[in-house]
Image (tube, helix red, strand yellow):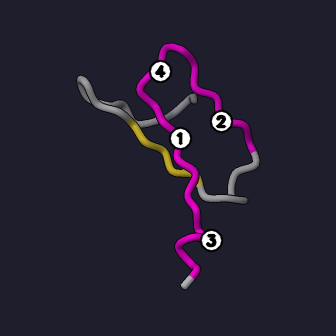
């Protein structure tokens, strides 16, 4: 990732990605170990 928020000491950065929004590949290099991608699940939230 080129641009992202930095976590404080002992912190973690969570990046939520919505389905069908970004068709790029998400790559986190080894020097950014505290980044986690989360895929949001809109179908579960929309069901009754």
Where are the magenta residues, as a range? 24-47
Tag 2: Cα neighbours inside 10 Å, few (<14), some, or many (≥20)?
A: few
Instruction: Please name the residue shown 72% across and 37% down the image.
Output: 25
Residue 35 appears at what percent x and percent y?
A: 46, 31
Residue linked to disc 1: 37
Give the quadrant of residue 26. Answer: top right
Residue linked to disc 4: 32
Instruction: Please name the residue shown 57% across and 19% down the image.
Output: 29
Residue 26, numbered circle: 2
Give the quadrant of residue 2. Answer: top right
In the displayed image of the protein, which residue is found farthest to the front?
Answer: 48
Distance, label 2 to label 1, CA atoms, is: 8 Å
Q: In terms of secondary structure, where does tag 3 sit?
A: helix
Magenta-span inclusion, residue 39:
yes
In the displayed image of the protein, which residue is found farthest to the bottom?
Answer: 48
Q: Do callouts 2 and 1 mark residues in contact (Cβ within 8 Å)? A: yes
Magenta-span inclusion, residue 38:
yes
Q: Is residue 6 above or below residue 19?
A: above
Residue linked to disc 3: 43
Residue 7 appears at what percent x and percent y?
A: 32, 31
Q: Is residue 38 above or below residue 6?
A: below
Q: Is residue 34 left or right of residue 27?
A: left
Q: In terms of secondary structure, where does tag 1 sit?
A: strand
């Amino acid at each position: 990732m080129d641009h992202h928020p930095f976590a404080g000491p002992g912190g973690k950065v969570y990046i939520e990605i919505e389905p069908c929004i970004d068709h790029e590949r998400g790559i986190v290099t080894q020097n950014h170990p505290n980044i986690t991608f989360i895929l949001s699940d809109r179908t579960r939230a929309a069901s009754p």
